[in-house]
Structures are given as C-alpha cells and as structure tokens.
Amino acid sequence: MMMRYCILSIILLVQLSGYCQKKWPIKILCLDNTSFSIREKPRFFKDTTDIQSTINTILDEWKGKGFIGASVDTFYFLSDTLYLHAYQGAKVSGIRLERGNLTDFEIAKFGLSKYINKNEIIPVRKINGLKEQLINEYENSGYPFAVVRLDSFSLIGQNYVAKIFAEKNVLFVWDTISKDSPTRIRSIFLRNYLGIKPGKPYREQTARKIDARINVLPFAEPIKKSEIEFSNEKAKARIFIKDRRANQFDLLIGLLPGSSGQKVLITGKAMLRLVSVFGLGEEFQVKWEKLQPKTQTLDVQLIYPFMFGLPIGINAKFELYKKDTSFLNLNGDYGIQFQLQANDYIKGAFKNQISIILNADTNYVKANRKLPPNLDLNINQFALEVFLQRLNYRFNPTDGYLLKGSVSFGLKSFKRNNSIAGLYDPIANQSFGTLYDSIKLKSFIMQFHFMLDKFWKIGKRQTIRTMIDGEYQINDRITDNELYRIGGASSLRGFDDRSILTPFYVMANLEYRYLLSKNAFFFAFVNGAMVKEYRNFKDRPFDVPYGFGAGAAIETRIGMFAISYAMGSRQDEKISFRSAKIHFGYINYF
C-alpha cells in the first residue's frame, strides 16, 4: 500500500507542477455502491499534501454522517478531473465506547466516565466531538501532536462497539520567548502578558491567542504572525513585533452657548499619557479639565501590571474636583490588581473620598433652619472591580467588547462645619450646630458601577457601537456634593460637561461608524439616559435626557483631529441649534 501511494504521489507531483494554477473537479466513485457517485466542487491543488488534506476532509464528512468505515483506496487524474475510488461501508447510527489505553485519571479528567464501558449508544456525530475534545485537552496539556482514534471495531446489531485510543506522543514545555525584531518591550512583560511560562506544559490555546493579544497592545504592533518552534521537547514562541508610538497628548476644546452676558463659553481638556516607557507595560496618566466657569478637575493615574514578574500589580488613581467656590472633592482609589489574561484583571482597592465645603451656605441655613445641600464628609470604602477586554483593535475597534463592573461598601461620616456651628439661632436660642444632631453622622454606604461597550462589525468598513453604563449608590442621605455628574463629549453627548447631577443613572449609546482608514472614521450617534432628579420633584422624580449628532476623526501625519456636533434635550431644555455643542479634539502619539 505504501509503495503504491509513493508512486502515485510522484506521478501526481509531476502533473501538478504544470497545472498548479488550475481548478480540478473531483469525482468520487464508490466501489461498494457502483450506482452512487459524487461530484465535488473544483479546487486548487499545489501538491499531494493538498490532495491528501482534501481526501481527509471528505472522509471526515462521511464519518460524521455515520460511514465510519469509509476509506479512499486510489486517486488519479484523468483528463481534467481528479478521480477518487472510495469505499463507503455500512452506515451506523451509533457506537458504544470501551476503554483502550486511557487511564482512569484521564477518563475522569476529560469527563468520559459517562461514555466509556457503559451501555449507552453514542451518536456518530457526537463521537467526532468527543475526539476533538480529547485532542484539545491533550494540546493544552503539553501534547500538541496527540492523536485520538477508534479501533478494534465489532458489529453488534445495528451498532458498533469500539475502543478509544490516544497517542500523546512527545511532551513539550514552554521555552523562552524569542523576539526576532528590535523592541524596547521586555521579555518578562511578554511572558506574563501572553501567559507563556517557561518550564510549564505547552498550551495550544495560549499559542493561538498570541497574535490577537499583541494586536490590542497600545505600544506594540505585529510585523508578521508569530511562530511556534518545536525542538528538543521545548516549544519556543517567536514574536515579530515593533514598537508603536503610544505616548499620548490630547487636547479638546469645546464651544458652548454662554450665560451671564457671555456669548460663548470655551471649555477645555488636556491629557498626557505615558505608556510602557520602561518596557514593562506600565501606564502613567495626568488629565486636566476646565468644563465650567471656575470649575476644574485634575486626575492622576498609575498602572503597573506585573510586579517582580508576578501577575500582581498596582492600579491607583487620584482625582481632585473643585466646584467653583462651593466645595472641593478629593477622591482616592488605591488598588492591587490580579492580572487574569492579557489586559483582564480583578482589582481590590481602598477608596477614600473627602469633600470640603469652601463656602458654607449660611444664608440657606438661616432661611430654612436646616442643613444645606452640600456638607463636609469623609467616605472610606473597600472595592472589588472586574475588567475584561475582547477588542480586535484597541485604537479603533470594529469587533469585540469591553466590560467593567465594580462594587464598593464602607462607612460615610459627616463632619460639622465651623461656619454653620458658629451661627446662632435667636428663635430656638441655640447654635445652628445642633442641626447636625438630626442626621446620622455615620452611616453605611454601598456603590455599584457597570459598563459594557460592544462593537458589532456589519461590513468591511462599517461597525455599530453599543454601550450601556450605569452607577447606583445606597445611603440614607446623599448630598449634592457627592452626586454623580454626567454629560459632555466623553459621557452623555449633547449636554454641557458634568451638567446633569443625579444619585443614580443608566446611560445608553448607539453609534454608527464608517471607517475611512485603520484609525480614522466618520460617526453618527444617538444617546440617552434615565436619571433621578436630585431635588426630588414630586411631579417628575425621573428625567430622560437624550442627545444625537455626528462627527469625524481624521488621521494626519501630526496626529488625530476630531470634530463633533451634538444637540440634546431634557425636561427643562428643548432641542435648539443655539444650544448645540461643538467639540474640537487633537490627539498626538509620540
């Protein structure tokens, strides 16, 4: 048999060398059923390996339909057609499995106990699935060349009894990573990020995800596909990457309708982001915002994903928010994150929020004989956060999703304000500081956050982006200076930045994108939210603000330029061209 295949292979190789660019029709003649023949679609063949691969595919299809004894005895070219002489054999409905050389441990580990040495008849289609499952298990346990087969067939009635055998072949373990191109990215980061651990059993699943994971790195891009080199019982991953300019400077300028005699209000944002400067995947970000008159925000964040080569890192953030001359919020989020795979992580954190009233509303206290909406407070919480990312391209994705969820709980404490405590109530003949006795100075607080950002590819250059985002907090008394603030170019578009105050919200976004290039696109969107009125109006406890608009992000040699035009409406504001929001943005990567 082997000699016959060798001779046929030589003859076919000679024939194919002259006709490798031609499509060959395939005709299958069943020798055990001469009245039955099949004509397959024409295919290209480069060499005999392609022919054998095609034959194996055809046999797999037959065996999946129940012809488990199917085989091809001869194949040859005649005129312009490839002929296959095949035996179909008898069609069976199912097989009863018996143990071949699998150990008790393997049977239990792979979940085969309910199939092997039982009287259960397993459908033929399911048998192929079990074989694939076994092969996948072996491939992810250090045996990339494992083979699973059925043997020792015997026919009992309409069903076969067969033994299942596994040939694991050589055990391979991971070797070091080979970087076949100059890059500042360190191997220790790549090993942790890609999940390649030298000395541990090779995992086919890990190898298949290498290119996808590299593609979402902001500071690297692939030159060509990675390769796995098997030698001396070791598997070496060969990575072909180059550094990508990922350090980022953003500038956003907004033109909004003014108030108090101002025709136009100019707002701005600026951000500096340094990524993997030391080749270890670290990130440092500083962001400044001036979104409303006399109101500013400063954010500082540090992420260091792999400390001491372990999947444990630092994820810390500090935010300063100053609301004109009313109050100052200092928010700290100091976390330790456990890296799951690629960019996924679970984070445990200590969160601290301090709110300082700069100018207490003493007139409100005197007029209403109760505490003002803004109060000095201190909140200490423990938090748990989960982050998952499955995007096909980080800068301008067309498929995949990003999910983030967190829950935090702790203690909130109100602090007595000296300006209020120093006021004297002539009617009650006592200090207004006694108003603090009417509230719980210490109470339990719990907060939730959920965000899902999903991209749906609908064409070569088109994608749909859907997003849902929401926050909710549980507490006996929620003051104005701790309310959530939404609205603006990076939140609910069509409204002033952080202009909508609410104790909880659910926000949704639907956006169409047409890609102009890999990083540039045109977009049109509609977004909306459900928010609770923080003043507790009895006739309208909820509001449903919505906005819509369009824009574009254009890539140039000196960076990305973006422009957007949006309009919004809520209960107190109707759609108006005069209140439209125009934002200009610039992003420079260096």
Image: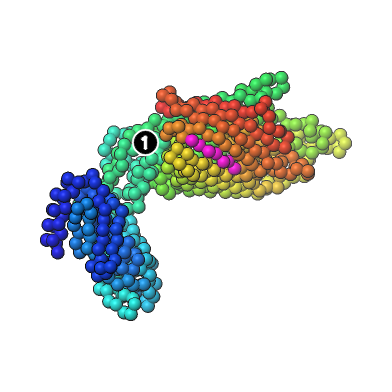
In the rendered image of this protein, does residue 268 appear above or below residue 373?
above
At label 1, the amino acid type is Ala
Q: Residue at x 49, y 40 (%)?
A: 463
In the rendered image of this protein, does residue 201 appear above or below residue 108?
above
On the question of residue 109 being in view, the answer is no
Q: Name the residue under label 1.
A: 220
Q: Residue at x 46, y 45 (%)?
A: 400
On the question of residue 515 being in view, the answer is yes
The percent position of residue 165, horizontal first and vertical second, equals: 27, 68
**To which quarter of the image does residue 27 belong?**
bottom left
Q: Residues within 10 Å of mark 1 (few under 14, many from 20)?
A: some
- Magenta residues? 508-514
Q: Is residue 224 left or right of residue 20?
A: right
The percent position of residue 157, horizontal first and vertical second, equals: 33, 80
In the rendered image of this protein, does residue 380 appear above or below residue 520?
below
Q: Is residue 436 left or right of residue 390?
A: right
Residue pushed farthest right?
427
Is disc 1 placed on a helix, strand or loop? strand
Q: Does the magenta stretch include residue 297?
A: no
The percent position of residue 215, horizontal first and vertical second, equals: 38, 40
Quadrant location of the N terminus in the rendered image: bottom left
**To which quarter of the image does residue 501 belong?**
top right
Quadrant location of the C terminus in the rendered image: top left
Q: Which of 76 and 390 is in front in this view?
A: 76
Q: Which of 355 and 338 is in front in this view?
A: 338
Q: Is most of the magenta stretch helix, strand or loop?
A: strand
